[in-house]
Image (tube, rainbow, N blue to C red):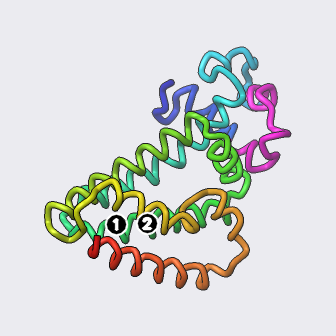
Amino acid sequence: MADAAGTPASRILAVATEHLRRLGPTRMTVVGVAADLGMTHANIYRYFASKEALLEAVSAAWLRELDAALTATADAPDPADDKLERMILEIARRYRDKVERDPRLFEIFAEAYDRDGPLSRRHRARLRGLVDRVIEEGLAAGLIGKDRNRATSLVFDLAFRFIHPSAVRFDHLVPRAELQARLERVVRALLIALRAR
C-alpha cells in the first residue's frame, strides 16, 4: 500500500480517520468511506483487504509518528539513561494526548493491543528493539548494570502503568499533572534500579 500524500491509499486513510473520529469503529463502514470518496467499496478493498485492515492502517499512521520520535531519541548522542527517561516520557505523553484528543482512534489501538493483533505485536517489537538498543549503550558505558534482558524487562515492568494502552485508557480521567508526577517518580526509581543491577 502506498502512503504518499495524494495517493488513493492516503485519501482513503484520511476519510476513514475522519469517519472513525465522528462515528467510531462500529458505525464506520467501508461503504460510507467509499461514498465520501466517490468510489465503490470494491475499490477500497484494492488497497485494504478488510475493514479491520483499514482500522489497523489508521492506527499505524499515528504510531509512525511516535516511532520516528523514539528512533530520533535512540539515535541521539545523549547518555543512555537520559534517552530511556525521554523515551518513556514520550510514549506516555503521546498515548495520553491520543486518548484525550482522539479517544476513538486510541480505543481502536487499545483494543488491537488487547487482542495481540499484528499491529500491536509490531509496535511492541519496535519499542522493545529501541529500548534494547539504548540498554546496550548503557551497558557499554557502565551506566546500566550487567544483564540486558533483565534491564529491558525492568523498564517495561515498572513503566507498565504509564505506557500500556489498557492502563492509559483506565487512567485517562486522572489529572494529567498528578499522573505526570507519579510517572516521573517511577522513572527516577527505574534509573536508580538500572544502575544497581
Q: Identify whether 73 is placed above or below 36.
A: below
Amino acid type of the residue tagged 2 in the rendering: Ile
- Mark 2 and mark 1: Cα distance apart in space: 6 Å
Residue 103 x/y as whole percent: 71, 58
Q: Mark 1 — residue?
A: 84
Quick one: 45 or 190, which is closer to the camera?
190
Q: Is residue 182 above or below residue 67?
A: below
* Residue shown at 65% from the left, 31% from the top: 54
Amino acid type for the residue under numbered disc 1: Leu
In percent of width and height, residue 127 lies at 42, 51
In front: 169, or 3?
169
Q: Which residue is mark 2?
A: 88
Q: What main secondary structure does the magenta stretch of the protein show? A: helix
Displayed quadrant of residue 115: top right
- Crowd class of label 2 (few under 14; some 14 to 19; many from 20; radius 10 Å): many
27 part of magenta stretch:
yes
- Residue 42, picture quadrant: top right
- Where are the magenta residues, as a range? 17-35
Name the side, left or right, on which 82 lies relative to 120.
left
Q: Position of residue 192 (x, y in %)?
A: 33, 79
Q: Residue at x 78, y 41 (%)?
A: 25
Element marked by disc 2 = helix
- Is 79 on the left-hand or right-hand side of 186? left
Viewer-side residue, 136 vs 106: 136
